[in-house]
Amino acid sequence: MEVRGLRVQEQPQWAEYCQKEWEHGDVCAPVSEIDMNKPVPDGTERTYWVVEENDNVQAGFTTRIAPGKRSCFLGDTYWLDLWIATPYRGKIEDELLQECETVLAQKGVTRITTRIADFNSRFVVLFKEKGYQELYKEDTFIREGSLPITELMLGYYKKTKEKVDLRISKNLREDIKTYTALVNEISAEIPNMSQIHEEHLDSVMYQGQRHMIGVWIFAEVKEVPAGFIGALISFQKVFNKNRVVGRVLNNGVLKEFRGMGIGSALYVEMLQEMRKWNAEYILDYMVMEDNLPERTLLKELGFVPAQKHVKIQKVI
């Protein structure tokens, strides 16, 4: 078994394999050529690996390494794009994971983390047998864009707007400091919510504008930032068909402003904004299994759980 980096000219083949040979997750396709061309934050090394034997492609996987911490994320941001060509399933998995860990150890990686897109996938069992430990579970929720918002939720929304200003910003450059400050303050008290840095948003603000629209909505109480919700609208393959999809990236309300209905109002405002762009489906990723308030809110807004993910980790 030979493991090597993907050549640029092989990207179309890789994307094709991902569409055909990806074994888990029925909602969203794992990766496309557009995804492969997206930049990564400065200092992060992303590599697509091809697994071959006698020039036959057997499998592939992605790694993202943060050199400063010597940690690796196996797979892409939301989807584990580890795929095995149909003729080799059930035959090479043990050797494949061993080779993967060998490659990463040679790069100085000491910890591997991955998110498996479907908790029912056989990959969950496979990784756990190899010493990976479960960190937590989370869900992707989905909603049809044309589904009406209930009168009850619209009523809450109107009451909140009487005391809270909701400001739509389609150019994050103008609000970058406000956005990062809100995310980082909220993440300090919410487990598994990562802090961000301005330089890490380059792909959203600049590189992605050819194929996606970014929408950020800020809640302000007497001109004081109180909360936010951010989303991207783009073409994406959902249920095996290219569609206009809105993806909620992250959201939150500062502790001192909770209980005012701001979280609900931000979602309603975003749903209405996505409707203007004719979003056929709206996805909300990475909703923690124990985040009952957000899960309840999403269900009240017409979202349903579509896919349960599990995040696992191994120290090597």
Image (cartoon, grey):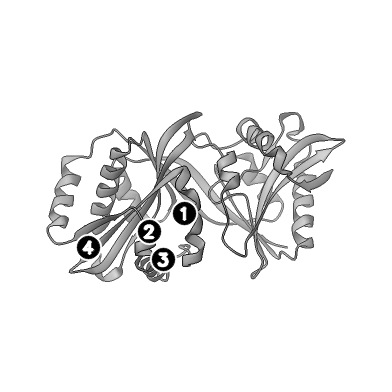
Residue at the spot 25% in from the left edge and 61% down from the top edge: 219
Image quadrant in which you'd find residue 109:
bottom right
3D distance between C-alphas at marks 3 and 2:
23 Å
Query: Mark 4 or mark 3: which comes first in sequence?
Result: 3
Residue 249: x and y in percent read 42, 52
**Disc on the earlier residue, 4 or 1:** 1
Determine the residue positioned at 24% across, 57% down. 167
Dot 3 surroundings within 10 Å: few (below 14), some, or many (20 or more)? few
Q: Is residue 19 above or below residue 65?
A: above
Query: Which comes before the other along the chain, label 3 or label 2?
Result: 2
**In this figure, which residue is indicated by the disc labeled 4?**
259
Do the residues bearing badges 3 and 2 touch, measured as CB atoms within 8 Å?
A: no
Secondary element at tag 1: helix
Taking the image as shown, residue 38 lies to the left or right of residue 299, namely right
Q: What residue type is labelled 3?
A: Ile
Residue highlighted by disc 3: 190
